[in-house]
Image (tube, rainbow, N blue to C red):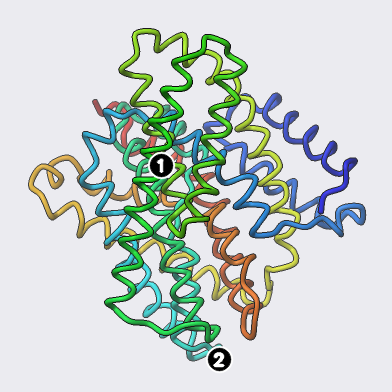
Amino acid sequence: MIGPINLLILLIIGYSVYTIDKKKKNIPVPVVLLVIGIGLGFVPMFADVELTKETIFHWFLPALLFISAYQYPVKALKKHGGEISILSTVGIVLTALLMSLLFYYSLKPVLSISYMEALLISTILTPTDPVSVVSILKQSTNRETIADVVEGESMINDGTSIVLFTVAAGIYFGEGSFSLASFTGEFLWVSFGGGLTGIILGWGISKLIHLTSDSRYQIMLSIILAYGSFFIGEEIGVSGVLATVASGIMLSYEYGRAIKEKHFRKHLDGFWEVIEPTILSLLFLLIGIKAIDYISFSLLGWVFLLFIISLVVRYVIIIGVVKIRKTWRKAYGWKEVFILTWSGIKGTVSVALLLGMQGKGAESIQSISFGVIMFSLILQSLAIYPLSKKLFSGKS
C-alpha cells in the first residue's frame, strides 16, 4: 500500500522531473525516475511501500496500453502489420526458447538452475516496453518506420508473453503440464478472443461517444473502454492486454472515419496526456523503490551476461524475420535491425510478471530477472538517442 503522504511526494517528484527535464531525448524521464526511486528505497518512510502484480495490472497497465493503442496511427498498423504480427507472436516464442537454452547453459556451471527456471526467466524478459523510446526514435531519425514497428510490436507482444509465462509458471510450480495441442488452442483463444473482444467494445463505445458532444461524457466513456475492455477480457478468459489494445486502435479507427475527428480527439487527448505522465511517474518511482528488495549484487556479473544474451537473441530473431520477405530485406538493413534490437527494452509487464510469482525458487528467479530489467531500462534507454542519431544522421 501507498500512504497519502508518500503518494503526494511521489507525484510531486514525478511532475517536477517532467517539468524540469528539457532534454528528454538525451536522458529519458523514466530512467531519471527509476534512479530517484532507487534512492528513495533507502529512505525509511518508503520502506513499507508495496508494488504488486495486481497494482500494475489493474491500475497502471490498462491506461498505458490504451494510450499507446489510441494514439498509434492506424495507417502504420496497416503498413507494418506483417512484421509486427510475426515479431510479436512467433518471434516472441522463438525468443523465449532460444534465450532459455542460452540462459540455462550459461548459468548452469555457476548456479543451481534447472531448464524450467531458465525458461521462466526468459518468458519474463520477452515483453518489450519502449515508453519514451518511440518519441526518441522519431526525434533522432528521419523516419517513423522503426518507431512504428517498435511501438506496434510492444503493444501486441505483451499478450503473447503473458500466455507464455502463464504456461511456464504453471509447469514450474506444479499447477499444470505442457501439451502442444492445448497450448496452441489456449494461445489462439486468448489472443484472437482478446482482439475480438476489444474490437467489439471499441466499436460500441465509439458509437456512444458520437452521440454526445459533451467532452466530460466522452472522457468518461474512454475510461470505461480502457479499463472495461481489460477486465471483461480477463473475466471471460481471454487476453485483457490484447482486448485493451484492440479497443484503443478500434476507437482511433472510428475517429478517423468521423467528420468531426478533431473535435472528438481534442478533449480526449488533453485528458490522457495528463494521465500518462502521472502513471509513469508513480510506476517508475515505485519500480526503483522495490528494486533494492530484489536485486542481488553478488550476481550482477552473471545478470549482465544474461542481459547481453537477451540482446543477441533479439538481434538474431529480428534478422530471421526481416529475411522472410524481399520488401522487408530492403527496408531493414543492419542499422535498422540494430536499433530495433536496442529498442526492445524490458519494463512494466516484465516487472508485473515477476512480482506475481510465489513458491519455491521464486526468489532467485525474481532476483535475476529484476537485475536484467534494470540493466535494460537504464543502459538501453540512455544509449538509444546517441546510437540512433549516429546511425541515421542525415539519412532520409
- Vertical placement of residue 315 versus 296, above or below: above
Q: Is residue 312 above or below residue 101?
A: above
Q: Which amino acid is tagged 2?
A: Ser
What residue is shown at x 57% (from left), y 52% (from top)? 348
Residue 107 screen position, x and y as percent: 49, 83
Q: Residue at x 56, y 63 (%)?
A: 353
Q: Sequence order check: which comes first, mark 1 or mark 2?
A: 2
Left or right placement of residue 324 versus residue 165 in this view: left
Crowding at label 2, few (<14), some or many (≥20) Cα neighbours within 10 Å? few
Which residue, given by chain and number where applicable, does mark 2 sit on? 112
Residue 265 or residue 317, whichever sits in front: 265
Q: Position of residue 395 (x, y in %)?
A: 26, 29
Q: Say which quarter of the image contains residue 31.
A: top right
Residue 182 position in % (x across, y down): 32, 75
Secondary structure of the residue carrying numbered label 2 = loop
Up-down relation of residue 96 to residue 199 (above or below): below
**The image quarter in which residue 103 lies:** bottom left
Tell me the residue that label 1 is attached to: 198
Q: Nearer the viewer, residue 104 or 248?
A: 248
Callout 1–callout 2 Cβ contact below 8 Å: no
Quadrant showing the N terminus: bottom right
Give the label on residue 367, or none.
none
Question: Is 65 in front, or is 101?
Answer: 65
Residue 71 vs residue 50: left or right?
left
Amino acid, disc 1: Gly
Please give left or right for residue 46 compared with residue 333 in the image.
right
SS at circle 1: helix
| Residue 391, percent from left and from top | 32, 39
Give the spatial CA distance, label 1 vs label 2: 43 Å
